[in-house]
Image (tube, rainbow, N blue to C red):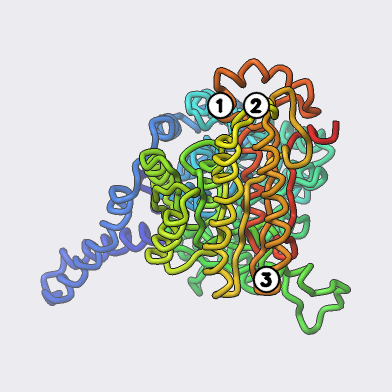
Amino acid sequence: MQADKVSDTPVEFVVEYLLKAKEIVENNANIPAELRDNLQKALDIASGLDGYLEQMSSQESEPLAELYRKSVSHDWNKVHEEGKTLFRLPVTCITGQVEGQVLKMLVHMSKAKRVLEIGMFTGYGALSMAEALPENGQLIACELEPYLKDFAQPIFDKSPHGKKITVKIGPAMDTLKVGYPTISTCQQSLELLNMSCSASNFYYLIILFKKKSSTILQELAATGEQFDMVFIDADKQNYINYYKFLLDHNLLRIDGVICVDNTLFKGRVYLKDSADDIGKALRDFNQFVTNDPRVEQVIVPLRDGLTIIRRVPYTPQANTQSTAIYDEVFRGVQGKQVLDRLRLDGKVAYVTGAGQGIGRAFAHALGEAGAKVAIIDMDKGKAENVAHELTLKGISSMAVAADISKPEDVQKMIDDIVSKWGTIHIACNNAGINKNSASEDTSLEEWDQTFNVNLRGTFMCCQAAGRVMLKQGYGKIINTASMASLIVPHPQKQLSYNTSKAGVVKLTQTLGTEWIDRGVRVNCISPGIVDTPLIHSESLEPLVQRWLSDIPAGRLAQVTDLQAAVVYLASDASDYMTGHNLVIEGGQSLW
Ligand SMILES: C[S@@+](CC[C@H](N)C(=O)[O-])C[C@H]1O[C@@H](n2cnc3c(N)ncnc32)[C@H](O)[C@@H]1O
C-alpha cells in the first residue's frame, strides 16, 4: 500500500540494506552458501512483514479507501507550485490501513468520546478514529493547510462518521513563530521539518500566524476542553512542546491516551552514529516521556514507530510540596473513582417482571453495568427473549419462568439462580399488577390478586433472596414501589394498587433497617406514570392527556429514565442508603 518505494520505516531500511547485501553476495562466487541462505531468510522475514500485516488486519471502509486512493494519486508538488499549499507535502505523510486500524482499535478500547488529532493531512487517521467513536463522539483535527480541509471534507461527508470530525485550520501551537524572525532562519527550520516552502507562501504563512491571536491548542485549553485520546502527527521537532502543553493544560484526561507517530524515526532515535536534527528531537522526546512520572508508555514498532502514552492517576511523590489531601475523596474509595463505583462487574442479579417495560429496562441497565442477570417473568417466552437481547450485548443472562405470587415458584427461581451462578447479590423485585375499580365496588378477589403479587409476592422474594444475602453478609434489594405510595393518582380509581404500593414502601423501610447491620440494603424506586404497554390499555389511554397536565416535567416517564437509579441502588456507591424510597416522577407528587 506504500505510495512510493522510498524507505521510510526501520523495517523498510532493513529490507533496503539486505537487498544491497544480497546484490553483493550474488556478484561474489566465494560467499558461503550458508551466509547466502541466512541472508535470504532475513530478507524474507523483513520484506514479508508489512504486506502480511495489511492482509491480516481488517480492511478499510470504502470512504477510507477512497481517501487513500485520492491522496496517493494527487500531485502534491503541483498544488504546492501553484501556491495552494504552504508546504510541499510528502505523500508518505499518510497514515495507512494498519496504523489506521490500530488507532481505531485504541479509540474502541479506551471508549474514547473526544479525540484530538494534531496534523490531519488528508484525514485518513481522523476518519479511521471517527469510525470508532460513538454517535455523539467528536474528533477535532488541527491542520495548518487550508487546502487539506477542502480536500478531505467531501470524503468525510460521504462517510456516516464524517459528521463527528471538526477540522480546525491554523497552527496547533505557535512553535514555528519562534523560528521566523528572518527568512533564512525560517527556511532553516522548515528544512529541519522536512518541508519546503516558497517565499511567497512563506509570507502568507507569517501573516497566517500573526493574524491568529492564539493557536488552536491555546483556544482549546482556554475553553476547558479535555480529550480522551490525542494523536500527535505533525511537526516532529515540536512533539515535546505539544506533549507538554497537553499535559500541563489538562487537555488530556486521567487515563486518557496520547498516540505519537514516527517515534522510531527510521531507527535514528537509537542509532549511535545518527546526527540529524529530527532524529535527535525525537530521541529527546522519547527520553522526556520516559522520565515523566505523569505517564506510562510503550513504543510499538509499527511502521515508523507508534508511542502509546497513558496519563496515570496522580500519586504523591515523597519530595513534592503539594498541599493536596490524598484521601479517599481524592483517590476514590478503594482507588475507584465515582463512575467506577457504579460498576457491577462480577455481581449476580435478578429482575422479576423483566419480560417487558420497567423490568426489561432494569435488566439491560444492570447487565450494561457488568452484572449477570436472571430474567424472571411469568411469561417464559418474554423472559427468554429479553435474556436473548442481553446475550446479544455480551451480557451473561438466564431466563426463569416464575409466578411470584406462588411461594414454590419464588423458591425455585432463587434456587435456579444460586445453582447456576453460586449466589445472588442484587434482587430487583419489580413484578406487579394494576387493576382499576371504584373503592365501593372493589372486589375481594381484585384486592387479593393485587396484594398477592404486589405485596405478598414482593415480600416472598425479599425473604427468599434476603436469606441468601444475609448468609453471605452482602446484598442489595431494590423493590419497585410507585408514586401511588405517596399521592393518590387520579382520576383513575385504584385503591388496591395504591395501598399495596404503600405497603411495599413500608416493607422496604422495615427490612432496610432490620438487615443493614448484616450487610443487606433494601431500597425502593417509586416511578411516576411510565410509558409502558400497561398504560396503553383501552381503559387508560384516554387518561394520558389528563396526567400530562399534572406533571411538571411535561411528559410521561420513559423506562430509560429509571435505569441509572437501579444501577446506583445496586452498586456499592449507595451503601449508606437503606429503607429509602427514591421517587422519580418528573415532579408530579409535588403539585
Ligand atoms: C504526517 S502528516 C499527518 C498525517 C495524518 N495524521 C494522517 O492520518 O494521514 C502531518 C500534517 O501536519 C500538518 N502540520 C504541520 N505543522 C503543523 C502545525 N504546526 N499545526 C497543525 N498542523 C500542522 C501538515 O500540514 C501535515 O498535513
The residue wearing badge 3 is: 335
Nearer to us: label 2 or label 3: 2
Q: Earlier in the sequence, mark 1 or mark 3?
A: 1
Please rate how many residues cluster around mark 2, counting C-alpha atoms within 10 Å: few if below 14, some from 14 to 19, many from 20: few
Please rate how many residues cluster around mark 3, counting C-alpha atoms within 10 Å: few if below 14, some from 14 to 19, many from 20: some
The residue wearing badge 1 is: 153
The residue wearing badge 2 is: 441
Q: Check whether the beta carbons of the residues at disc 2 and disc 1 lie within 8 A of each other.
A: no
| Amino acid type for the residue under numbered disc 1 | Gln
Q: Earlier in the sequence, mark 2 or mark 3?
A: 3
| Amino acid type for the residue under numbered disc 2 | Asp
Q: Earlier in the sequence, mark 2 or mark 1?
A: 1
Nearer to us: label 2 or label 1: 2
Question: Number of marks in the image?
Answer: 3
Up the image or down, 190 lies above or below 206; here it is below
Ligand 1, by image quadrant, is top right
For label 2, being within 8 Å of ligand 1 is answered no
Residue 97 appears in the rendering: no
Residue at point 88%, 73% (across, down)? 323
Instruction: Give the quadrant of the C terminus.
Output: top right
Residue at point 76%, 24% (across, down)? 554
Res 431 quadrant in image: top right
Left or right of residue 513: residue 32? left
SS for callout 3: loop
Left or right of residue 217: residue 236? left
Nearer to us: label 1 or label 3: 3
Residue 574, position as x, y percentages in the image:
70, 60
| Amino acid type for the residue under numbered disc 3 | Gly
Work out how far the residue at label 2 is from the one at label 1, CA to CA, in angstroms: 69 Å
Residue situated in front as seen by the camera: 178 or 453: 453
